[in-house]
Image (tube, rainbow, N blue to C red):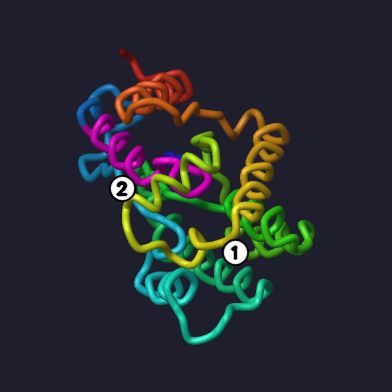
Amino acid sequence: MSGRFIVFEGVEGSGKTTQVQRLQTWLLQNQPLLPSQTNSEFQIVVTREPGGTDVGQEIRQLLLHSEQEPIADRAELLLYAADRAQHVEAFLKPRLTKGHWVLCDRYTDSTIAYQGYGRGLDHTLIDQLNQIATGGLQSDLTLWLDLEVETGLARTQRRGASDRMEKAELAFHQRVQQGFVKLAEQHPQRIVRIDASGTEEQVAERIQTVVKQRFSIAS
């Protein structure tokens, strides 16, 4: 595929959504400098998991906002896999094939961190489901926004109503954070740690530096 696939990961409140938007704006401003960008229909698009498709929006509602009954851990895992399978086929692959740049808020590492380390589900099973759901599609770059769990959760509380995942106990979020630490150690070529403390502008500059180096974008 000729496009570029950049994923943002991190614990709750780490600033992913904000930084995805900031990077899209920065890339659009520097679009003439992007390598191999000759398609007149070239786009820099933003998406998320769960919820990057119409089907995914319904799954997202179930996963994060449903109060009908508790969701079993394995059911949660399978719902995320279903969302991802639809996302890859209906959104990601078509755009990457056309050469577009795709910025995604969460992808496979979140499932390993949240359902593997956080929930304690079998990692081999998760790897198998991720492979099935993605068909082998990996990010070209994953930006891990590293922030203390307590700081991130405090940010989410200031935003107002919390979703089902944000309401989980502190120990769960600490296990998730440890999962991201382990993943970054295991995949240093794909995952780059970004210090997510400081102002939005400071974090955005750190991200831009990494993206310029990784994709040979001239200053």
Left or right of 124 in this view: 174: left
Q: Which residues are magenta?
A: 8-28
User: Could you say which is closer to the camera, residue 199 or residue 4?
Assistant: 199
Residue beneath the point at 28% across and 22% down? 33
User: Could you say which is closer to the camera, residue 119 or residue 154?
Assistant: 154
Q: Is residue 189 above or below residue 152?
A: above
Q: Is residue 26 magenta?
A: yes
In terms of sequence position, does the residue under pointer 2 or pointer 1 come before the other?
2
Q: Amino acid at mark 1?
A: Ala
Looking at the rendered structure, which numbered label has been put on residue 16?
A: none
Residue 199, given in percent of the width and then of the height, sits at: 33, 27
Identify residue for label 1: 133
Residue 72, given in percent of the width and then of the height, sits at: 65, 77
Circle 2 Cα neighbour tier, 10 Å, few/some/many (<14 / 14–19 / ≥20): some
Q: Is residue 124 above or below residue 44?
A: below
Residue beneath the point at 68% across and 64% down? 129
Identify residue for label 2: 45
Residue beneath the point at 55% across and 67% down? 80
Mark 1 lies on a secondary structure that is: helix
User: So how many labels did they put on this image?
Assistant: 2
Mark 2 lies on a secondary structure that is: strand
Circle 1 Cα neighbour tier, 10 Å, few/some/many (<14 / 14–19 / ≥20): many
Q: Amino acid at mark 2?
A: Val
